[in-house]
Amino acid sequence: MFRDFKGCIAWTDAMKDGQHYVGLIEYQPKCAGAAVQLLWVPAFGSVCESEAETAADNLLRQIRDITIDGDVVYRDGVAL
């Protein structure tokens, strides 16, 4: 899944972590040379890459905004 925010672009992925998989939300500010940031999304007990990416998709849907400074703001107003 891809989401386009005012200051960043975000996308989901998954990777193997030992015997299980973990979901990933990667995001990058929309400015030249900006580094990609990463949020790990626990997918406890997930033995399938698609399950882990679905967990990341579900969390990305709950994000209202990712600012150019990298602040992640959820729909309920909580910010990381």
Image (cartoon, helix red, strand yellow):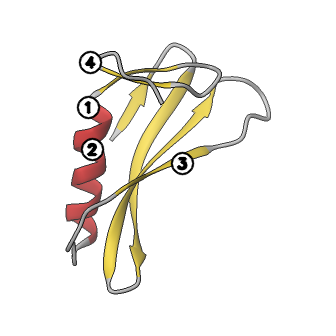
Compute the Cα span from label 3 to label 1: 16 Å
Compute the Cα span from label 1 to label 2: 6 Å
Q: Which image quadrant for residue 22?
A: bottom left
Rendered position, 43 above or below 63? below
Q: For the residue marked with disc 1, what is the amino acid? A: Arg
Q: Tell me which label, 2 or 3, sits earlier in the chain.
A: 3
Q: Residue at x 62, y 20 (%)?
A: 68
Compute the Cα span from label 4 to label 3: 21 Å
Residue annotated with mark 2: 57
| Residue farthest to the bottom, as pictured | 19
Q: Secondary structure at mark 1?
A: helix
Q: Which image quadrant for residue 44?
A: bottom left
Left or right of residue 43, residue 69 in this image = right
Q: Where's residue 27, x and y in %?
A: 53, 38
Q: Residue at x 63, y 27 (%)?
A: 29
Residue annotated with mark 1: 61
Q: Tell me which label, 4 or 1, sits earlier in the chain.
A: 1
Q: Tell me which label, 4 or 3, sits earlier in the chain.
A: 3
Q: Where's residue 43, x and y in %?
A: 26, 62
Rendered position, 77 above or below 29? above
Q: For the residue marked with disc 3, what is the amino acid? A: Leu
Residue annotated with mark 4: 76
Compute the Cα span from label 4 to label 2: 17 Å
Label 1 CA crowd tier, 10 Å (few <14, some 14–19, many 20+)? few
Compute the Cα span from label 2 to label 3: 14 Å
Q: Residue at x 57, y 17 (%)?
A: 7
Residue annotated with mark 3: 38
Q: Are marks 2 and 3 in contact (CB under 8 Å)?
A: no
Rendered position, 33 above or below 65? below
